[in-house]
Amino acid sequence: MQTTPGNTRKPPTLADVAKLAGVSLATASKSLNGRQQVKAETRERVLSAAEQLNFSPNVLARHLLSGRSGTIGLVTHDLEGRFSIPTLMGAEDAAGTGKTSVLLCDARGDALREQYHVQALLGRRVDGLIVVGARPDPRPSLGQLPVPVVYAYAPSQDPADMSVVTDNVQGGRLVAEHLLACGRSRVAIVTGDAGYGAAHDRVDGATAVLSGAGVEVLGGPLYGAWSEEWGRTAAGLILNRFTDVDAIISGSDQIARGVLDALREAGRRVPEDVAVTGHDNWEILALNARPQLTSIDMNLEELGRRAAALLFDAIEGNPHHGTEVIPSRLVPRGSTGPKPA
């Protein structure tokens, strides 16, 4: 059936609302945007007219009237998405459906690429930026920008900036407390690159708890790569030197997977003979491990929600400064349990 001009209905416009309400175009716009200069009875008349006409104001036009774009930018350096994706999910939760859009850019660990993405996002008139690091160590500030910035996961080196980070020291404490509660007393630690502050923070948290219970770390913490291969190698070294080891704390889930492989090849049962813990709660690794891996969850979605909430505060004219720490939590699974009598 052919549509004729006579049965085509154009969507109602702001001018139609103004005409029905008997007000000017400017007054209709102010009424629909909640401006205080309009009398309550006039606003009611305009809202009633908009409802009768089934008028929906243009979102872009509404943002332009408010001087904002309704978008924020998220710049990440995390190539695998392990940290940026849950952070993005949390930020979108805080943004609210349909209220604010999040534009994602991957800087790939390159400072020049980061500057390019920042300028591109500013060119799109974003209302603010969240910058997510690839590693939880302090990073250079972006300096003064025309929009607010919140640094997530990797804090800014400038204390005047706003940063939101995870609690790596607490993560180390939680796994050590858990293993002690399981009756483990011959504990080794295998972690990642010694150049990472997070590696030392996790070790510091664990050793403080173990020392307080009179338990020494077997052979001292072993630093290496954030990889399964290093986990296998380090576990082999530990088994050769300390045959009575009954727990291995791993600095990441990848390392823990390598530790599990080495224990299996050596005929050691997990968790009966040796309990194993990881860090990150990267579910693709933790849930597919055999047995499933006890790990530390850094609450990255909460980190993203909090970063976005702080950014929205700053956009509204209430900026925050300093570093806020999001607590971690232990997720116990089959790789740990009570030591058999």
Image (tube, helix red, strand yellow):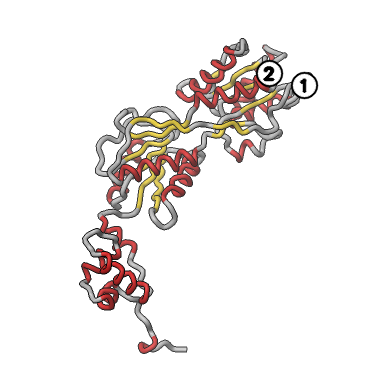
Quarter of the image with the C terminus in it? top right
- Circle 2 residues within 10 Å: few <14, some 14–19, many ≥20: many
Please say if 108 is above or below 225: below
Q: Residue at x 41, y 38 (%)?
A: 132
Q: Residue furthest right?
A: 341
Q: Residue furthest front?
A: 41
Indicate which disc residue 291 carries: none
Please say if 142 is above or below 223: below
Precedes in sequence: disc 1 or disc 2: 2
279 relative position to 55: left or right: right
Distance of label 1 from label 2 (alpha carbons): 10 Å
Q: Residue at x 49, y 20 (%)?
A: 200
Q: Residue at x 41, y 34 (%)?
A: 164
* Residue 108 visible in the picture: no
Relative image position of residue 173 (x, y in whole percent) = 55, 22
Q: Secondary structure at mark 1?
A: loop
Please say if 30 is above or below 231: below
- Circle 1 residues within 10 Å: few <14, some 14–19, many ≥20: few
Relative image position of residue 289 (x, y in whole percent) = 67, 35
Indicate which disc residue 184 carries: 2
Question: Mark 1 is on which residue type?
Answer: Pro
Residue bearing the label numbered 1:
340
